[in-house]
Image (spheres, helix red, strand yellow):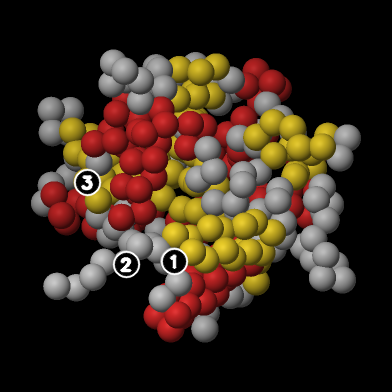
């Protein structure tokens, strides 16, 4: 992989702003002094520059999350964003998303009732045994959660592809010559997701450099996967289906042989400033 320039809680609930926030964070971390976006390109495909350019120019929408229409070439670019993490999930969503919501509610209550200026919370996202969170434990479980959570979100959005196309064409009131579909996937694990070796945290996990997720794209009806991490938005990575070949798969990481390392309970610091009403 080479670096290139240029109450029920539903994990899939979105707003029009999420894709914009994703792009803003990536731009802040990946844009150089010349205004070029630096990103990682998995495989050799010059079109990756083009898809990143269209991502940053796309128009926020409802279904999909964003689109860009190249009127000169009559090409419609569709971008759908989803989030995933390493935490265990249930019908009520991931443990991380549930606990983030609980912590936010508690913070809002404290602000309202006590007018505090600083709040320290702990957001639980990992496994707990006897009220103890163990660093470096449950590496296989976190890996399995990562794969399962990503795959479930991927497949759910994949089932909506025709709706995304129809809604964009209704908006544009035309039939494009070509439609290019990209899923924009974001790891929301607090503190990031890392490989575990000798019970230590090593390099960050990039799903687009693994056999499991390369094959997921290869066997799907979409054209690109675009990845980034909330913890480190400088990891912006693009994988094109056209770049997938036997050599790429051979060089990729096999997650069957890996364990993951995350911080099971993550501290959150909130600072509140009040303004006198005059």
Q: Is residue 54 left or right of residue 117?
A: left
- Residue drawn where x is 65% and y is 43% of the image: 193
Which image quadrant: the N terminus? top right
**Is residue 158 shown to the viewer in this render?**
no
Place of residue 36 in the rendered image (x, y in percent of width and height, measured from the top left): 32, 20
Residue 59 got which mark? 3
Secondary structure of the residue carrying tag 3 is: strand
Residue 117 got which mark? 1
At label 3, counting other C-alpha atoms closer than 10 Å, the crowd grade (few under 14, some 14-19, many 20 or more) is: some
- Please name which of the two marks, 2 or 3, marks the residue nearer to the observer: 2
- Residue drawn where x is 39% and y is 40% of the image: 25
Q: Which is more N-terminal, label 1 or label 3?
A: 3
- Residue drawn where x is 72% and y is 56% of the image: 264
* Residues tagged 2 and 3 counted as in contact (Cβ below 8 A): no
Of 22 and 140, nearer the camera is 22
Distance between the alpha carbons at the discs numbered 3 and 1: 37 Å
Distance between the alpha carbons at the discs numbered 1 and 2: 8 Å
């Amino acid at each position: 992989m080479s670096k290139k320039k240029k109450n029920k809680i539903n994990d899939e609930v979105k707003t029009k702003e999420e894709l914009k926030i994703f792009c803003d964070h990536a731009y802040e971390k990946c844009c150089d002094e010349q205004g070029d976006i630096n990103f990682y390109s998995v495989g050799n495909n010059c079109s990756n520059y083009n898809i990143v350019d269209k991502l940053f120019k796309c128009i926020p929408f409802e279904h999909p999350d964003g689109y860009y229409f190249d009127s000169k070439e009559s090409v419609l670019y569709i971008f759908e964003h989803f989030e995933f993490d390493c935490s265990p999930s249930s019908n009520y969503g991931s443990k991380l998303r549930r606990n983030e919501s609980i912590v936010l509610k508690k913070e809002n209550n404290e602000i309202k009732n006590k007018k505090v200026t600083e709040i320290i919370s702990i957001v639980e996202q990992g496994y707990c045994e006897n009220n103890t969170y163990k660093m470096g434990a449950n590496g296989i479980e976190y890996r399995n959660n990562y794969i399962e959570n990503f795959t479930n979100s991927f497949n759910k959005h994949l089932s909506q592809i025709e709706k995304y196309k129809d809604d964009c064409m209704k908006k544009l009131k035309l039939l494009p010559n070509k439609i290019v579909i990209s899923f924009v996937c974001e790891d929301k694990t607090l503190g990031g997701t890392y490989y575990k070796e000798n019970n230590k945290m090593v390099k960050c996990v990039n799903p687009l450099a693994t056999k499991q997720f390369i094959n997921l794209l290869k066997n799907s009806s979409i054209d690109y996967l675009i990845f980034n991490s909330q913890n480190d938005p400088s990891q912006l990575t693009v994988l094109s289906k056209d770049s997938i070949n036997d050599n790429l798969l051979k060089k990729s990481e096999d997650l069957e042989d890996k364990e993951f390392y995350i911080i099971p309970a993550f501290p959150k610091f909130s600072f509140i400033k009040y303004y006198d009403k005059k």
